[in-house]
Image: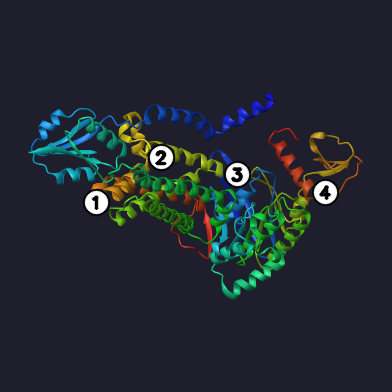
Amino acid sequence: MSFGLTGVTVRFGSTVALDDVTFTCPVGVVSAVVGGDGAGKTTLLGCLTGMIQPTSGQVDRPDKRLLGAMPSTSGTWHDLTVDENIDFVAKAYGMHGAELSRKRDQLLAKTGLERARSRLAGQLSGGMRQKLGFLLAILHDPTLLILDEPTTGVDPVSRVELWRLISEAAAAGAAVAMATTYLDEAERASTVLVLDAGHTLASGTSDEVLRSLPGAISVAERPHDPRRAWRRGRLYHEWRPDGTASGEQTDAADLEDVVIAEMLQRREQRGATPA
Amino acid sequence: MWAMVRKEFQELRRDRRTMAMLIALPLLLLVVFGYAANFKVSSIATDVYGPQAQQVADRLQDPFHPRTVDPSGTRQDAETAVRDNKVDVAIVTQPSAAPVALVDGSSLFAAQSAVSAFNRLGGQVKVDVLYNPELKTSWVMVPALAGLILTFIGVIVTSLGLVRERQEGTLEQLAVMPFRPSDVIAGKIAPYFLFAAFDMVLVTVLGIVLFGVPFNGAVWIFALGAILFLLVLLGLGGLISSVSQNAGQAIQLSLFVMLPSIMFSGMIFPLTAMPWTVRWIGYVLPLTYFINIAQGVMLRAAPFTALWLSFLVLAVYAVVVFTGAVLRLRQDLAPNVKAESPPERASKTAAPA
């Protein structure tokens, strides 16, 4: 079983937020959508939650009771304690009694929030608040879990912990749809959809996306064509559409290289000057 | 420094609400203090009843202006006209005694002007001040203050409560949870309704205990008026929150409701002393009608039939404003989902071709 979008186009007036986008979220795995600001990630997730009606195309999603969502702002009530946040969401999903107690204890232990139960959500650190938001989203064992940039602004340790929780949710049987700006995170997902200004640049497994690279990536201290190069550490990575490396060191491209190269290619095709 | 000044102007130019305040506030204050800030009532509608009604009416001078002249009318007719707020003064003529002027003490400034004018006549007219014999300001202000406090809670606090959900991103979260939009809206508004109702009872009871303000009329009429007024205010709060992205914007817009309510509702400056160029603002404000009901019930024991117009206006306001607010909030909570569509176990949403 899977959920997702098929051939979805979303227009806001004259702006095309999504252009014929297909995104599949199979049960039991994490499907990531990546892209820069304004790429259409949140619009895509909005279609999945039902908050945005596509102009055309089809959306497959479960009933609201089987859907869990976490917005980029964590979706926690800042003036409620951790326990009160959990109680409120649990009641909304009709959970109570022993079932709720068991689930609450289990998730608080998993997220490391046991000792913060009586703290206000607004007084938690960014990472803890994101974990609480995640806990609220999975409290009712959703079939489709939608996460909008769950690790943005979170410290590296909390990022690792959140990613572990996300993987566990998928392993437990949820279809996880996750938007992220971190390409190293996206590489861990089973499938990746790369968006740029509402258009699909690449999609498939990480390997498939890596193989879709048009040309090659070279690494050098000085780039041949600065318009097709970007700095990573001390060196420049450069997209070579013709696949030639001219005797320079050719590095095995990662997802970040491929996404940047795909974006450069699209902008060149549209007649824009490469960055 | 010039860079800072330039940046500030650029930001101000784009902050339309602050710009509106910068322009509207001086204009509002100018209009208020130029036209509305007048305690002297120069024209008082007056009924004259009794056998010599016509002769007395013919001799009436400013500020009294005859409305009804009825030689067959009685003191009972005069009392009814004053109680029902048809006139501020009703004169009853008697065959062998000086005429008696019944003055509505709940219209404080009109009553003060009337008493002062009658006193100048040197005892030719016997003055009988009804409903507020000592012309105490607190008796008139307490019912009005109850309305103002409700306006404060209803508009500012409600709009802030709803905007907080938007600001923290939890409105979006509520929208994807298995709540019906009507549940969310009712659940959000009910606590403010209860708080406002509690505050109103508190203010009214304290007004009675501390200032000796009478409560002469029927509690149910007062309660019905308060409920309608509250619905209008909660609706206004909802509408303000639906067009505000943060607390600052909500407070700015709430001030646009609060300031005219204080100035033009008749709470401080009498409406009858204002020229029509600004008086109409008072008749657009819901607080004006609530004050009419509150003072009518508490001081004059006015029956429902005497207050029906204020009830009708508040009811129409309540329906229009509250429905508008619910529709706007529903848009936030279920922008594309039909309100009454039953939940399905799994849905396939296909857009129209």
Q: Please indicate whether residue B229 sits to the left or right of residue A115 in the image.
A: left
Q: Mark yes or no: residue A63 visible.
A: no
Q: Is residue A171 above or below residue B215?
A: below
Give the quadrant of residue A142.
bottom right
Q: Which residue is mark 3?
A: A17
Q: Which mark is residue B303?
A: 1
Q: Chain of mark 3?
A: A
What label does residue B284 carry, if any? none
Are there few (<14), some (14-19), or many (20+) residues within 10 Å of tag 4? some
Task: State how far apart marks 1 and 4 are (Cα).
Answer: 85 Å
As drawn, the label of residue B261 is 2
Q: Are marks 4 and 2 in contact (CB under 8 Å)?
A: no
Q: Residue at x 13, y 29 (%)?
A: B58
Q: Which residue is mark 4?
A: A253
Do discs 4 and 2 belong to a common subunit?
no
Q: Chain of mark 1?
A: B
Amino acid at circle 1: Pro
Q: How many marks?
A: 4
Residue found farthest to the top: B2
The picture places residue A159, in percent across and down from the top left corner, at 75, 56
Q: Nearer the viewer, mark 1 or mark 4?
A: 1
Chain under callout 4: A
In this rendering, the label closer to the viewer, 3 or 2 = 2
